[in-house]
């Protein structure tokens, strides 16, 4: 089992009035916001440095297009 890094907090959600569905929804939102799912996906398999650069460049181009589309509207 891997130890937690110093200063890292566990995600906690309070269940109010037995509303487990609402608490589960809130928990999923908090986990997604922390970036954990994307981090796990990124670490599933090794990718070569050249591929990482290529993907980063693609993401930058995609974000720039989105930003330009928002500015035009």
Image: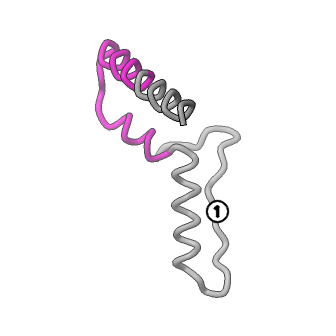
Given residues 46 and 19, the one toward you in this image is 19
* Horizontal arrangement in the rendering, residue 69 relative to residue 19 (left or right): left
Given residues 67 and 49, the one toward you in this image is 67
- Most extreme residue toward the right is 7
- Most extreme residue toward the front is 73
Circle 1 SS class: loop
Place of residue 21 in the rendered image (x, y in percent of width and height, measured from the top left): 52, 78
**Quadrant where the image shows the C terminus:** top right
Residue ID for mark 1: 12
Question: Dot 1, crowdedness within 10 Å: few (<14), some or many (≥20)?
Answer: few
Q: Is residue 47 magenta?
A: yes
Residue for point 29% across, 32% down: 45
Residue for point 49% across, 43% down: 2
Which color mode does the image show? Answer: one colour
Q: How many marks?
A: 1
Residue for point 58% across, 65% down: 26
Quadrant housing residue 44:
top left
Quadrant housing residue 15:
bottom right
- Most extreme residue toward the top is 50
- Most extreme residue toward the bottom is 17
Magenta-highlighted stretch: main secondary structure? helix
Place of residue 70 in the rendered image (x, y in percent of width and height, measured from the top left): 54, 35
Vertical placement of 44 versus 28: above or below? above
Given residues 54 and 11, the one toward you in this image is 54
Quadrant housing residue 65:
top left
Residue for point 37% across, 40% down: 41
Place of residue 24 in the rendered image (x, y in percent of width and height, measured from the top left): 53, 70
Q: Is residue 50 magenta?
A: yes
Vertical placement of 31 versus 51: above or below? below
Q: Which range of residues does the magenta coloring cover?
A: 36-60
* Horizontal arrangement in the rendering, residue 70 relative to residue 17 (left or right): left
């Amino acid at each position: 089992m891997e130890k937690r890094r110093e200063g890292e907090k566990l995600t906690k959600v309070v269940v109010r009035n037995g509303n487990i569905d609402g608490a589960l929804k809130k928990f999923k939102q908090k986990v997604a916001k922390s970036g954990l799912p994307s981090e796990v996906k990124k670490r599933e398999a090794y990718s070569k440095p050249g591929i990482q650069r290529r993907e980063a460049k693609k993401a930058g181009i995609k974000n720039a297009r989105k930003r330009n589309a928002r500015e035009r509207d």
